Image (tube, rainbow, N blue to C red):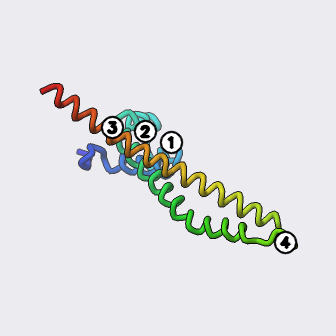
Amino acid sequence: MKKRDQSGLTDRELVAVAKFVQGATPGEICEDLNIHPTTLMRWRQKPAFIEAMRTGREFIWSMVANRLVDECLSTTAVVREMRDLPVDGFVGDTKVANVKLSASRLLLEYASKAQDMENFKARLEALEARLAGELNENQL
């Protein structure tokens, strides 16, 4: 009998989930785990596998959002540096300055969007909890 964790997935299924979340292709996963592609397709249809994938991807996106927020501190320093450059007689490499400024702007935009998504997610979860509570009250 195969060992299963509390989610109902075997160790090999959990490894497949982890590999998917880390960006491996189905072919790579089949090769690494020495399984047939139809086995992987069958695993991917299991509700527990689908839920584990969702949870894993959610975790990865959360890490990415946190990293973007962390990068904002150094990014604002770059923006300040570019802001304070003298306009007249700039001697440095303008291409480098423009690239730094563009990259900084992108990071700030992405961090802002990530924060918006986190706020939206929190509001959605609160709304879903409220609706679930109202449904339970109406059923009583």
Image marks 1 and 2: residues in contact by CB distance under 8 Å: yes
Residue 61: x percent and y percent? 47, 51
Q: Is residue 75 left or right of residue 38?
A: right
Image marks 4 and 3: residues in contact by CB distance under 8 Å: no
Instruction: Please state which of the two labelled residues, at mark 1 or mark 4, is closer to the viewer.
Output: 4
- Circle 4 sits on which residue? 90
Instruction: Please state which of the two labelled residues, at mark 4 or mark 2, is closer to the viewer.
Output: 4
- Circle 2 sits on which residue? 40
Residue 132: x percent and y percent? 25, 33
Image marks 2 and 3: residues in contact by CB distance under 8 Å: no
Hey, what amino acid is under mark 2?
Leu
Q: Residues within 10 Å of mark 4 (few under 14, many from 20)?
A: few
Helix, strand or loop at mark 3:
helix
For the residue pair 47 and 116, the one nearer the viewer reads as 116
Which residue is at a point 22% across and 29% down the rendered structure image? 135
Between the C-alphas of marks 3 and 1, the distance is 36 Å
Picture mark count:
4
Q: Residues within 10 Å of mark 3 (few under 14, many from 20)?
A: few
Query: Which circle's residue, 1 or 4, is located before the other in the chain?
Result: 1
Q: Residues within 10 Å of mark 1 (few under 14, many from 20)?
A: some
Instruction: Please state which of the two labelled residues, at mark 2 or mark 3, is closer to the viewer.
Output: 3
